[in-house]
Amino acid sequence: EVQLVQSGAEVKKPGESLKISCKGSGYSFTSYWIGWVRQMPGKGLEWMGIIYPGDSDTRYSPSFQGQVTISADKSISTAYLQWSSLKASDTAMYYCVRHLTPMMEDAFDIWGQGTMVTVSS
Amino acid sequence: QSALTQPRSVSGSPGQSVTISCTGTSSDVGGYNYVSWYQQHPGKAPKLMIYDVSKRPSGVPDRFSGSKSGNTASLTISGLQAEDEADYYCCSYAGSYTPFVFGTGTKVTVL
């Protein structure tokens, strides 16, 4: 079964750093783009960025460029989303997604269960 | 890069059809045949319903259909059922530099 399993919920203080994970299984992890999607409480979906684990080629939305870092460790089939200094406005559910085919252009067919990040003093 | 525009809400009675529009620009919706649609029930992860404008993944009922004209894509749900009540989001490829943009989302209510 193809699946993405994300790390658990996090509660952090403003200014702290954080790295959440997304482990792929059931398919060739290095052959498919992995993306991250943010959903703030009660709001819509926002595309953040993607990475191709095979060569670590990464693209970001202008809204998130410089605010987060996307990375991947292909040896353990895991993608990451990290912050160096969290803000209260980073409070949201974060989903990792796999593309339907190895093409960057394609839709997101597999979604992780989501990781809730709460940033509060 | 601005979000694609969707109506805030649409509604219909069981058995009726509803159509959700998704308006972008020639740099996203109008420029590529890579529009997808996602269904999200409360508290759940989104689910892919339509990809490449009009293709349905295995397991998605054929009462869900997609189309595109110019800079506007559409999702039609025919024979509306109670379980179709959810939020729906469109998404379009927008070029290799900043590849994707989501729509603003539409709440579908089954009356």
Image (cartoon, coloured by chain):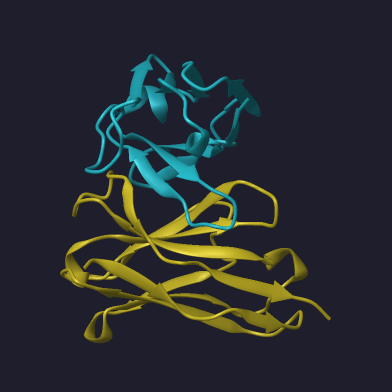
Work out which quarter of the rendered image holds the C terminus of chain A and state it. Answer: bottom right
Residue B81: image x %, image y %?
47, 30
- The residue lying at 30 percent from left, 68 percent from top is A3
Judging depth in this view, the residue of B104 and B88 nearest the camera is: B88
Chain B as rendered: colour: cyan
Vertical side of B45 occupied by A77: above or below: below
- The residue lying at 50 percent from left, 79 percent from top is A20
Judging depth in this view, the residue of A79 and A115 nearest the camera is: A115
The quadrant holding residue A77 is: bottom left
Residue A15 lies left or right of residue B13; in this view the side is: right
Residue B19: image x %, image y %?
48, 19
Query: Which residue lies most toward the right here?
Result: A121
- The residue lying at 54 percent from left, 48 percent from top is B41
Chain A as rendered: colour: yellow
Residue B28: image x %, image y %?
41, 31
Vertical side of A33 occupied by B25: above or below: above
The quadrant holding residue A74 is: bottom left
- The residue lying at 28 percent from left, 44 percent from top is A105
